[in-house]
Image (cartoon, rainbow, N blue to C red):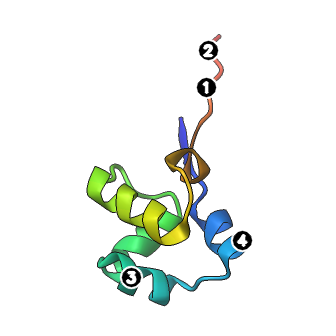
C-alpha cells in the first residue's frame, strides 16, 4: 500500500493548498484528492513539481507500507 504524506509535508512547510496548487500548476480539487490519499495515480511531472516547490524528496511525500499477507 502506498500512503501519501503530502498533508504532513505541507504542514511542515506551512503552505496552503491554494498556494501550492498555484505554484505547481494543478487545480485545487486535484491537489486535494492527492492530499487526502484518494488519488489512484500521480504523474512524474506533478511529483517533480511538488518536490521542487516543497523542497523535498519523493519519499517525503510517498511511503510504501507492506500489507499483511496471511
Question: In the rendered view, would you say 70 is above or below 38?
Answer: above
Farthest residue, direction right: 12
Of labels 3 and 1, earlier in sequence is 3
| CA separation in Å, label 3 and label 1 | 33 Å
Is residue 3 left or right of 27 when viewed as pictured?
right
Farthest residue, direction top: 70
Q: Residue at x 53, y 65 (%)?
A: 36
Q: Which residue is mark 1?
A: 66
Of labels 1 and 4, earlier in sequence is 4
| CA separation in Å, label 3 and label 4 | 17 Å
Of labels 2 and 4, earlier in sequence is 4
Q: Nearer the viewer, mark 2 or mark 4?
A: 4
Q: Which residue is mark 3?
A: 23
Q: Residue at x 61, y 14 (%)?
A: 69
Of labels 3 and 4, earlier in sequence is 4
Residue contact at pointers 2 and 1, CB within 8 angstroms: yes
Q: Mark on residue 69?
A: 2
Q: Mark on residue 12?
A: 4
Which part of the image, by quadrant, shows the C terminus?
Answer: top right
Sort mark 3 into few (<14), some (14-19) or many (20+) by Cα contacts within 10 Å: some
Secondary structure at numbered mark 3: helix
Is residue 11 left or right of 23 when viewed as pictured?
right
| CA separation in Å, label 1 and label 4 | 25 Å
Amino acid at each position: 500500500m502506498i500512503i501519501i504524506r503530502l498533508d504532513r509535508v505541507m504542514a511542515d512547510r506551512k503552505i496552503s493548498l491554494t498556494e501550492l496548487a498555484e505554484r505547481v500548476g494543478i487545480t485545487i480539487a486535484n491537489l486535494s484528492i492527492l492530499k487526502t490519499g484518494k488519488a489512484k495515480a500521480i504523474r512524474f511531472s506533478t511529483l517533480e513539481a511538488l518536490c521542487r516547490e516543497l523542497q523535498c524528496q519523493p519519499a517525503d511525500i510517498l511511503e510504501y507500507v507492506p500489507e499483511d499477507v496471511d
